[in-house]
Amino acid sequence: MNGEVDGPEVTEGESQEGEGRMWGLLQDLLEAHGREGTAALLGVSERTLRRAESNRHVTPQLQKELERYVEGSLGDGPASQSQARELALELASLKTRVDGLERGTREAVNGLRKEVTELAAENERLRKRVDELEQHSEGGVGRKPAGADGDNPGPSATTPFALDRRFPELVTADAADGEEAVYGAATALAGEWRAQRRAYLDAADDWTRLTAELRMTELEVELIDVHELTLPPSDVPWDGIRRHSELRRRQRTLERLRRERRRARVKRWLLRLATLGWQGR
């Protein structure tokens, strides 16, 4: 006799319940720390954890490491081992869940801050665009207010602005007199875009059509992204969300056209080589 008293006999139901608690604790650890972090905490290999996840069963070795982790989390606990183990399981599971919630909350807060910052920037940009539109509607683009610089033009005086429309951001399918006062630095790009659009519509072969569409799409990306213009068939300026959507769509189209043009160029080279070889024979 050594003075120790054996604990109460563990029944089969209690054993299954304990194993279920261990399995729940393992799931909480995996969710909070991932497989690599859980393996480091328990001192086991990732292969052991994968096997346990696949079989949905905690092996005796893994259960032993989980109990050791629980005891380490508990520290100095009650004298009863069964009570200590049960309490430690609850505490460890609770701690793991709290850690997971804290991490999820931090990620959600960071994501929300980023979205708020982006929305604030977009709102500021839209506010500036509204101010510009109001200025256009009041004084016109490229037009000086009456009496500016001491000018007092008579009825026969002319201005460089010949377009009269509400939305100067719209790119028209056809050129108009005085549009350089509207488009500014983008005037040449708009003209080239019209030319490539006509070449695309009038193309007599696939290569010419593909080349024209590729260049036309490159110009559209620049007109939308750099100069913030709106393209046909839209008849009102795009807002920030619509502009981003139109830009992304054309960027994807541009990537596809570049791939198609590379393949088409290879086919043209192969055809020329084959033709030269046949003529040589």
Image (cartoon, rainbow, N blue to C red):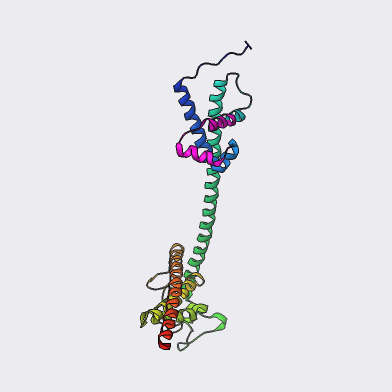
Q: Quadrant of residue 233?
A: bottom left
Give residue 78's position: percent from left, percent from top: 60, 20
Give residue 12's position: percent from left, percent from top: 45, 22
Which residue is drawn at the image coordinates 47% and 22% (left, top)? Answer: 14
Decide which of 44, 254 is in the foreground and name it.
44
Decide which of 8, 142 is in the foreground and name it.
8
In this picture, which residue range is highlighted in magenta? Answer: 44-69
Question: Where the N terminus falls, by quadrant?
Answer: top right
Assign the magenta stretch its main secondary structure.
Answer: helix
Decide which of 81, 76 is in the foreground and name it.
81
Give residue 65's position: percent from left, percent from top: 57, 32
Q: Is residue 44 above or below residue 206?
A: above
The reply to whether residue 216 is visible in this rendering is no
Give residue 273's position: percent from left, percent from top: 44, 82
Judge from the rendering whether residue 208 lies leftward or rightward of residue 31; answer left or right: left
Which residue is drawn at the image coordinates 46% and 79% (left, top)? Answer: 190
Residue at far front of view: 281
Decide which of 140, 105 is in the foreground and name it.
105
Q: Is residue 105 magenta?
A: no
Q: Is residue 92 above or below residue 241?
A: above
Which residue is drawn at the image coordinates 53% and 43% (left, top)? Answer: 104
Q: Is residue 49 magenta?
A: yes
Residue at far top of view: 1
The reply to whether residue 26 is visible in this rendering is yes
